[in-house]
Image (cartoon, grey):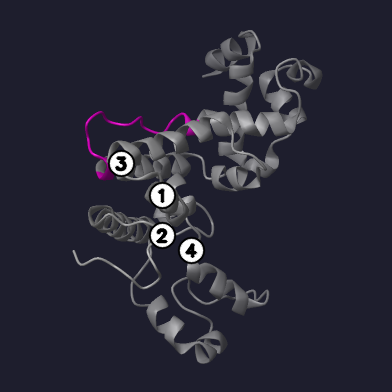
Amino acid sequence: MAEQAETLRRTPLSRDRILHAAVALADLAGIESLSMRNLAQDLGVVPMALYKHVANKDELLDGMIDVVVGEIDPPVRDAGWKHTVRRRILSAREMLRRHPWAPLAIESRNMATPALLAYLDSMVGALRAGGFSTDLAHHVMHAMGSRILGFSQELFDASRRAGRSGATDPEPPAAFPPEVAARFPHLAEIAVAASHDDASVVGQGCDDQFEFEFALDLLLDGIERLHQEGWTSSRPPGERQDG
């Protein structure tokens, strides 16, 4: 292990090496630990050496996002739009499990990175290849939201946090605090209706695997129905075609 680390430190510095080292550092210690100084120390170089390859920390973060997005499985040829979209979204989710800092990093950027744009473009391409109109494809991407990147915000985590008020002895994760449950009984009832596996959560505040796939399949089934009906956004509100 020591020999491998020494060999890596002797490898000529490059943008690719810097980005992968930054990803590894964020994976190990969290995105908040990432600084040009810490990264340079890990690479065995002075901080100024990094700036020959990345202009600043913003460019570093963009490059890191492109590295991890590049881990998402490519489309399977002739697999059908529904299978392709579902498989790639779940692959994106697996990527986020390996890199739990990525959702926050992606959401923090003002503009999508090239690899992220390419991924989103290919997902729209899968819909168009499946016969979707540009109109329906547009609304599908909005409906998917962050779920198309493999994550979504968990509803009940925020609700439970709202009732804790900094308490040092919070209720078990599956239950609302008593005072919150008394005010919002219906939410409290469904919050304990099923257990959630904390080990399957992509990141803090994100839903677990079962709930994610449940919602994803609901969306995909609904999208499939609209596609078969020839749905368009120009149809008057409330009007629908019988299947």
Q: Residues within 10 Å of mark 2 (few under 14, many from 20)?
A: few
Q: Look at label 4 and name its amino acid.
A: Glu
Label 2: which residue?
Answer: 234
Majority secondary structure of magenta residues: loop
Circle nearer the viewer, 3 or 2: 2
Q: Quadrant of residue 41 in the image?
A: top right
Specify which label sits upstream in the sequence, 4 or 1: 1
Badge nearest the viewer, 4 or 1: 1
Q: Quadrant of the C terminus?
A: bottom left
Residue type indicated by callout 2: Ser
Closer to the N terminus: mark 3 or mark 4?
3
Q: Neighbour class for label 1 at 10 Å: few (<14), some, many (≥20)?
A: few
Q: Quadrant of residue 82?
A: top left
Label for residue 154?
Answer: 4
Q: Earlier in the sequence, mark 3 or mark 2?
A: 3
Determine whether the residue tagged by mark 4 lies in a helix, strand or loop. loop
> Tag on residue 135?
1
* 78 in the magenta segment: yes
* SS class, disc 3: helix
